[in-house]
Image (spheres, rainbow, N blue to C red):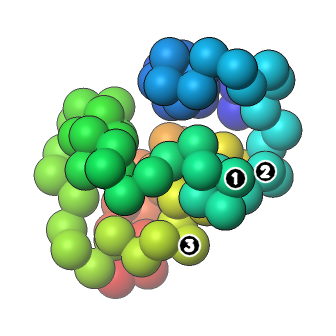
Amino acid sequence: MEEALKPVTAWLLARNPETGEIPADLDLIENRLIDSLGFMEFILLLEDLVGRELPLQELDVDRFRSLRAIHDNFLSPQATSVGKHGS
């Protein structure tokens, strides 16, 4: 999981340099590591990583709440092989 999340973690740490290690289950939104101003930039990063545009139905905020959720919903082999996340 860590390897796939390296670009995401680097993006978060670049915007939150005071943050140390980010636990996999830390709520990134509640802890303000992703805010409303950076959310669209974050979506663009994820689109680059997955190699496709994320449809609006995939933009449920709960899919981005933690590093684990981001990995499971977008970056894991199962996410890309199932592809449309159950749709």
Name the residue type under label 2.
Leu
Using the rendered view, name the quadrant where residue 21 is placed: top right
Q: Which mark is residue 62?
A: 3
Residue ID for mark 1: 31
Q: For the residue labelled by badge 2, is the local secondary structure a helix, a strand or a loop? A: loop
User: Does residue 36 appear to the left or right of 8 in the view shown?
Assistant: left
Q: For the residue labelled by badge 1, is the local secondary structure a helix, a strand or a loop? A: loop
Closer to viewer: mark 1 or mark 2: 1
Which residue is at a point 45% across and 52% down the rendered structure image?
A: 35
Which residue is at a point 34% across and 44% down the rendered structure image?
A: 38
Q: Is residue 83 visible?
A: yes
Counting from the top left corner in percent of width and height, residue 46 is at 34, 41
In 3D space, how far apart are the residues under numbered discs 1 and 3 (Cα atoms)?
14 Å
- Compared to residue 85, the image places residue 82 above or below, namely above
In 3D space, how far apart are the residues under numbered discs 1 and 2 (Cα atoms)?
8 Å
Are discs 1 and 2 less than 8 Å apart at CB?
A: yes
- Neighbour tally class for label 3: few under 14, some 14-19, many 20 plus, Cα within 10 Å: few
Pick the front one: 78 or 51: 51
Name the residue type under label 1.
Asn
Q: Where the N terminus falls, by quadrant?
A: top right
Counting from the top left corner in percent of width and height, residue 33 is at 58, 43
Q: For the residue labelled by badge 3, is the local secondary structure a helix, a strand or a loop? A: helix
Q: Which mark is residue 26?
A: 2
- Compared to residue 13, the image places residue 68 above or below, namely below
